[in-house]
Amino acid sequence: MATTTDIFDDVDRALLTEVQKSFPVGHRPFQALGEKLGITEQECLSRVGRLKETKVIRQLSAIFDTRALGYQSTLAAMRTDPARVDEAAEVVNQHPGVSHNYKRNDPFNIWFTIAVPPSDSLEQVVSILHTLAKAEETIILPTLRLYKIGVKLDLTGQDASLESQAEMYDEQRRWAAKPPLTEQDIRFIRVLQEDVPLLEMPFGVWAEEAGASEEELFTWARRMEHLGYMRRFAAILHHRNAGFKANAMVVWQVPQEQVDAAGEQIALFREVSHCYRRPVYPNWPYPLFTMIHAQTYSACMEVVQRIEARVGQFPHKNLFSTKEYKKIRVKYFTPALDSWWAEVGSKVDISK
């Protein structure tokens, strides 16, 4: 039986690798992308459309920095009764700020990321989810330092095994003082966080929707990226359909004084998409988190071995996702949370 990846040709692989890094924000973006790939605008549109229909490209949109927008976010881990883990995960999924939710091979069997607006308490929301899911234990694991963020799967096999420092996300820019968001900023964010229309001039449609000109939209996008509100405009893939069947969340028990040095080195590995420093707990002594994406389980383990050869051997756990419960992009500045609060208010005491 043929797999999705069997129908990829060299142009598909180059296209998928390129659009994860950046998609042109301009008057005719598919023409610009096509020129880079050596194909016509219409062929580029056709290929992107096919790769979306076959669920290889998940979404093509602006990728905003949650914290820069004023939202609070965290990774959380729940330990639940294995007999009702799916039921508990479904409860967690109901919160519109939950973007990722996976079952993993650990006593902490539900792992999810959640973002809430400035008006909400992150701790209160996680506590409510803990209660509603009837979890046995929940730990909150916010980012203390970000060394790398961004899934960029290499389908060409031509990228270097280690990335350059220039390719790393600028953490200093993330924390730099920024002007407050205006109503116009929020209008643009609401538009650009959606999936780009598959049209020759998609940004013209979006500009009209936002009540602006194309050039105003382009200028705004460049400014948002410069300020760090927007990380990039790019594609997110369905990893498995793109041929990357395995992903391991490897957590490292690194001495506190060595965490930053180790994190900065591990972040350079091409296969590592996310690398964070997080808090430790008496029953969770792992301050360094890394996400590894590869085509197979054994390929993930080979990356772990290369990391150990470069950084040193530390006690670690390899947590593989055994079920994907939810994976979406968080939608900012939408009314979806109102209905969630109305629903949970009838189930738990939210006045505390």
Image (cartoon, grey):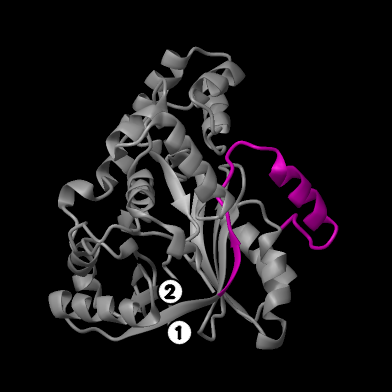
Q: Residue 34: in sight, yes or no?
A: yes
Q: Is residue 308 above or below residue 269?
A: below
Q: Residue 182: in sight, yes or no?
A: no
Q: Name the residue under label 2.
A: 246
- Distance from the alpha carbon under mark 2 to that under mark 1: 26 Å
Left or right: where 130 falls relative to 229: right
Q: Measuring from the top left, give residue 333's x and y in whole percent.
A: 61, 36
In-front residue for pair 46/268 = 46
Q: In this view, does 117 lie above or below 77?
A: above
Q: Measuring from the top left, give residue 249's x and y in whole percent.
A: 40, 73
Give amino acid for label 1. Asn
Q: Mark 1 points at which residue?
A: 283
Q: Measuring from the top left, give residue 2's x and y in whole percent.
A: 51, 70
In the rendered image, residue 337 lying in the magenta stretch gets the answer: yes
Left or right: where 81 falls relative to 275: right
Q: Residue at x 45, y 59 (%)?
A: 7
Image quarter hosting the C terminus: bottom right
In-front residue for pair 246/64 = 246
Near mark 2 (Cα within 10 A), the count class, few <14, some 14-19 or many ≥20, is some
Q: Point out the tag, 2 or 1, that comes first from the N-terminus.
A: 2
In the rendered image, residue 223 lying in the magenta stretch gets the answer: no
Q: Is mark 2 on a helix, strand or loop?
A: strand
Quarter occupied by residue 5: bottom left
The residue range painted magenta reads 323-352
